[in-house]
Image (cartoon, rainbow, N blue to C red):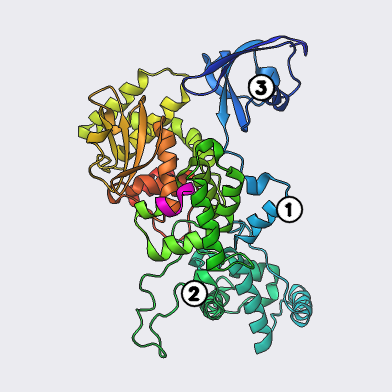
Amino acid sequence: MEATDVLRLRVILDDINAERLILPSRPETVNALIIEIKNKLNLAYDFRLQFQDPEFDNALCNLGNIEDLPSKATIKIVRYLEPDLSSTSTDDTLLSDNTDSLDRLCRWPEIFVIPTFSYEVEHALREGNYAFVKEGKTLNLTRDQKHNILDGMAAEIYKHKAYPSTKNILMAAEALVRKHPCLKEKGSGTGYEGWKNSLRFKMGNYRTKLSRAGIKDVAVNAGKRSRTNPEGAASRAKIKRPRRGEINFMPNYPQGETKDTLENLRLEMVEQFKKTVTDRDMIIIHQHMQRTFALRREEIVNSAPPIAELKDRWPALFCEAQLYSEFHRITNQNLPYSFYAALDKYTPQLLRLYKKRKTGSFGEKMEDILRAYEEQDKNNITAARTAALAGLPLYLKEDSSEVFKTCKDELESIQDGAVALVAVVNEEDVPAGVPFESHHVSIVLEDQVVMSHRSWTDSLVILFGMIYALHLSYPEKLSGFFEFIQVILLNLDDGRKQLKPKLQALRNEL
């Protein structure tokens, strides 16, 4: 195609809006096209592009090469997360707020990096590694040298996790012996079994030391039963620690802040929310939400206040952009982007698996979902996503009726259910309670509407973010469904929990 081709585009903005756009020449790259669209249509958010590919019956495909785009085409905007001021701004204050409010900025690494030990220990290890390569001789450490290695390893492990799993400890021990083969243990099948046990005990001692220093994510579990506190709770009773892949579970207050100064920032945000939407200073709200993260987590994890109280105290948490920012603070993941990228990857496989199950009552209900999906526009990616999610509880043999609800009158539906998505629809009968089209969907927590959205799939993403931000349990009858989102779609696995057999089987299929 000539670089000067005129481009005639139909730009789909969302489910109900589209714009006509004519460009006098074809941009040289996809990024240049995105900039043109932003300028012409006055779009302030970031997005990627999909286009109707004529080679695949006009099905939507991701646009990676500008030459693949026909001169007359329909393209769809796929939005990323709202810009996170704390991570995209070049303002020093905002960047300081971001890093100062979080204890951890990355997840457990794929390859554990061994820290540098004391000068004396590093010298001994260099000499020991040389002797091991030349003669196969292992190094005999002094007590102080071994303590130095364990102290350094414990500090490095804590940078990623306060409560590492057995798998994490094993990875660290293996990495230690791989880098310093002179530390291999004679008579051990792996060569690092003893190091694994030593690191496990060392982490317990290291947490005790940090707890005494007031480090919050371990101090929260202080006061358990011991020789000095025989009346305390059992040492393993109600341990408050990350259980769903959280990185920043209970961070410390930012440097220079106290509970009182952070409470003043919270009150300033409450005053902002008394103003009209147009008059609110969203930059101040974002900065204060970032700064008060530790106070908010302390309150939510320790006290578990009612939802109504949280709405009064932290109204920004119930705004979509700030909810996604909170999820990012907790997990270091962009929730909507990660969710939809993984869902789009697995949707074709899930739909194929559903079509194989056509027996019994399960098969009949699945047929209803697939039949409703077939009636939708095949180019509608939202319909495919909805079908994949609607069929998942059936595939896992879970009951979604108490969580996924539909009604014609919203008031009649908000009467029961601690956690629910209530879609207002025209039809009487909606397969699995998951509509392909709705007037709007209400997110219900503790019998009250906390947020609403037009799209059912977006409402589900919001609900999942709420569960993390408010430290809620998964609905008991849909625990497998939400674990699928957590572990398979978002890869938020702490390495401790054994998946249910049906969920593990599905994971293997995918």
Closer to the camera, 309 or 387?
Answer: 309
Lower position in the chain sequence, tag 3 or tag 2: 3
Crowding at dot 3, Cα within 10 Å, few <14 / some 14-19 / many 20+, comes out as: some
Residue pointed to by mark 1:
92
Residue 422 is at least partly visible in this image: yes
Horizontal and vertical percent position of residue 27: 74, 19
What amino acid is labelled 1 in the image? Asp
Lower position in the chain sequence, tag 3 or tag 1: 3
Question: Is the residue under label 2 in contact with that under label 1 (CB below 8 Å)?
Answer: no
| Residue 315 within the segment the image draws in magenta | yes
Q: Quadrant of the C terminus?
A: top left
**Residue 302, quarter of picture:** bottom left
Closer to the camera, 96 or 221?
Answer: 96
Q: Residue at x 40, y 70 (%)?
A: 239
Mark 2: which secondary structure?
helix
- Residue 37 circle label: 3
How far apart are the alpha carbons under marks 3 and 1?
30 Å
- Residue 219 circle label: 2
**Residue 414, quarter of picture:** top left
Crowding at dot 1, Cα within 10 Å, few <14 / some 14-19 / many 20+, comes out as: few
